[in-house]
Each structure stands twice: as C-alpha cells, then as structure tokens.
Amino acid sequence: MTQSQSSSSDTQWPRWEVFKQDAPNRPHQAVGSVHAGDPPHALVTARNVFVRRPAAVSLWCVREDDILTATPEELTTNPALLDTPGEAGTYHVGVKRTNKRSMTFVDLSGTVQASGSGDALRQAQSLHPDVLAWMVFPESAVVRTDEDPGTVESWFAPAKEKTYKQQQHYGVIGRHVGELKRAGLMPGRAPSEDSA
C-alpha cells in the first residue's frame, strides 16, 4: 500500500482515490478509485460510479501519486517510508480500523501540519497507533465538489423517480422489491388480491 510508480509508456489515465461524505456530520471515507484525465473528469466519474443512488453530500478525489499509505507491517520492514519527501503544509489523515465490512473503508480522521508526506505518516502513526493502515495526502492535492446548496442539490439529490435495472425488472429508486411484488409490478407476479 505504498505510492505507485507509473512507467513512461503507461497509456492509462491516472488513478484517483475517491472520498465520499454521506452526511454533514460523517467523515469522508475512501470508497474506491476511478481513472480520469483531469480533476473535473475525476469528480464526474466518481459521482457516476459511487453516487448514483446512495446518499452523499460531498465528494473528494485525490490522485493516487499524491497519497502515501502504509500498514504497521510495511513500516516495520520499510521504515524509510517515514522519510518520504513532500510539500510542507496541511495533510489529511485517514485510518483503516477494520476489515469487517464488505467494503473496507478508510475514514478521514483529521489533519496535521507536516513538513512532508513521511512526517504526516509519522504523525498519523502517533495519533492512531492501533489501526490496520494509515493514509496521508496534502490538502493541496484534494479536488472537491462545491459546498454551496445548489451544487449539493444538483449533484447529490436522490433520484427517487429514476428507473434502474435490477436482475428481473426495472425498478424505481426508493421502492423496496417487496412493495413492487405486492403491487404486481414485477414480471411474472400478480397482485396478492388477484392470486387467490
């Protein structure tokens, strides 16, 4: 889980880590990654992949090359990670506490002032000694959606009337499959009062 090195012959777009905030009082969480050519493309792609139906109020994208991650085992075998250079300034700190969920999120836990990526990682290790992994990246590397109400509404409002494909039919977001079955709206199903 360390910074990746891309070769000069690599033709794939850069990889961006996506951070989603579900509600104003929740932390941003690393939910996956996308490949994109530039910051606006990264945000739009992240929205299309990670916020089609789930709740969200904010998205951040950070290029993979700007992120330094490490596990306790990696720091034991490669302590030079703590000397990784980088710009001085504010760094976001992410921690991975568990593998129990189906998606293994990294929660952003705050910021530190650091002289570089290695120093930020050292501070993250000191602040959160008992975690599965740490992630740090500079504030200057973050590309984010605007926080104004118009942007939040247009980017993240639930699409309750938009249809989407399930395995057997097209449903409407927000309607539980049981409700559709009882109403006879699923193929091959009849309303419960007609089935007698």
Image (spheres, grey):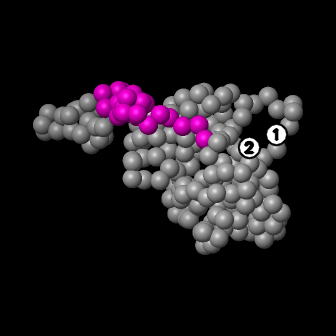
Q: Secondary structure at mark 1?
A: loop
Q: Hey, which quadrant is residue 75 in on the image? A: bottom right
Mark pair 1, 2: CA separation: 9 Å
Numbered badge on residue 65: 2
Does 144 lie within the magenta span?
A: yes
What residue does disc 1 label? 6
Q: Label 2 is placed on what type of residue?
A: Asp
Residue 110 visible: yes
Does 115 lie within the magenta span?
A: no
What is the number of callouts on the image? 2
For image coordinates 47% across by 34% down, the residue present is 146
Which is nearer the eye, 22 or 188?
22
- Where does the image place residue 42, in percent across and percent down from the top left? 60, 32
Specify the quadrant that holds the N terminus. bottom right
- Where does the image place residue 176, in percent across and percent down from the top left? 29, 41
Q: Residues within 10 Å of mark 1 (few under 14, many from 20)?
A: few
Left or right side of 28 for 131 = right
Q: Label 1 is placed on what type of residue?
A: Ser
Residue range highlighted in magenta: 142-164
Q: Hey, which quadrant is residue 80 in on the image? A: bottom right
- Where does the image place residue 112, in percent across and percent down from the top left? 61, 58
Specify the quadrant that holds the C terminus. top left
Residues marked 1 and 2 touching at CB (< 8 Å): yes
Q: Residues within 10 Å of mark 2 (few under 14, many from 20)?
A: some
Q: Secondary structure at mark 2?
A: helix
Left or right side of 69 for 108 = left
For image coordinates 12% across by 37% down, the residue present is 193
Left or right side of 20 for 149 = left
Extreme-right residue of the structure: 8
Please report whichever mark, 1 or 2, sits nearer to the chain's N-terminal start.
1
